[in-house]
């Protein structure tokens, strides 16, 4: 049974999906950070921006590691999964560390909210009907 796994178009679809999510998440982060900066103070906007950037980097790393962890070699997959978690958690911890060290420059609460910016973008896009959707294979 051919699943299309070697079809170049099929292989490009996940990369396009990831790029779309990253672009949309960055756009939402920048727009919200500027709005928050204007209405609440720039430490709010910087906090959301810092967390949002960490969220996007985390998503990008996860998307990059995932295909490599689906390797038939169980040992290699386990090592890569652990490495992925350590690197991605380090990115999030670094963002929180910066906010905690410089609370006058970065809102800690909005940095935490920003860490979920990719998830917020995915869910809001799905609810509002403008998010990227995965193509359905085999259906009309």
Image (cartoon, helix red, strand yellow):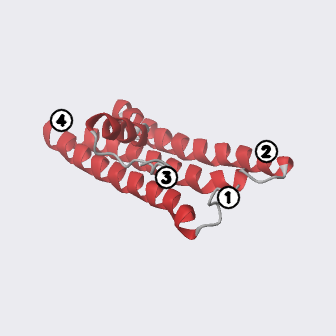
* Position of residue 71 in the picture relative to residue 53 (left or right): right
Return the residue at label 1. Answer: 2
- The alpha-carbon separation of the residues under discs 4 and 2 comes to 44 Å
Return the residue at label 4. Answer: 40
Residue at x-position 47% and y-position 55%: 18
Q: Comparing marks 1 and 4, which lies closer to the viewer?
A: 1
Return the residue at label 2. Answer: 78
Q: Earlier in the sequence, mark 2 or mark 3?
A: 3
Q: Earlier in the sequence, mark 3 or mark 4?
A: 4
Question: 139 or 54, which is in the foreground?
Answer: 139
Q: Earlier in the sequence, mark 4 or mark 2?
A: 4
- The alpha-carbon separation of the residues under discs 1 and 2 comes to 28 Å
Q: Are marks 1 and 4 in contact (CB under 8 Å)?
A: no
Residue 99 screen position, x and y as percent:
42, 39
Q: Which part of the image, by quadrant, shows the N terminus?
A: bottom right
Alpha-carbon neighbours of circle 4 within 10 Å: few (<14), some, or many (≥20)?
few
- The alpha-carbon separation of the residues under discs 3 and 4 comes to 26 Å
Residue at x-position 18% and y-position 35%: 40
* Position of residue 89 in the picture relative to residue 33 (left or right): right
Return the residue at label 3. Answer: 57
| Residue 106 visible in the current orientation | no
Looking at the image, the residue that sits furthest to the top is: 109
């Amino acid at each position: 049974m051919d699943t299309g796994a070697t079809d170049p178009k099929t292989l490009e679809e996940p990369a396009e999906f990831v790029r779309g999510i990253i672009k949309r998440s960055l756009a939402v982060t920048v727009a919200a950070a500027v709005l928050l900066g204007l209405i609440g103070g720039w430490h709010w906007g910087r906090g959301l921006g810092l967390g949002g950037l960490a969220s996007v980097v985390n998503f990008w790393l996860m998307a990059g590691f995932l295909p490599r962890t689906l390797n038939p070699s169980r040992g290699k997959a386990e090592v890569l999964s652990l490495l992925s978690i350590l690197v991605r958690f380090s990115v999030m911890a670094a963002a929180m560390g910066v906010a905690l060290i410089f609370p006058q420059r970065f809102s800690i609460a909005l940095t935490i909210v920003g860490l979920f910016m990719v998830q917020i973008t995915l869910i809001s896009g799905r609810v509002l009907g403008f998010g990227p959707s995965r193509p359905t294979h085999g259906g009309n």
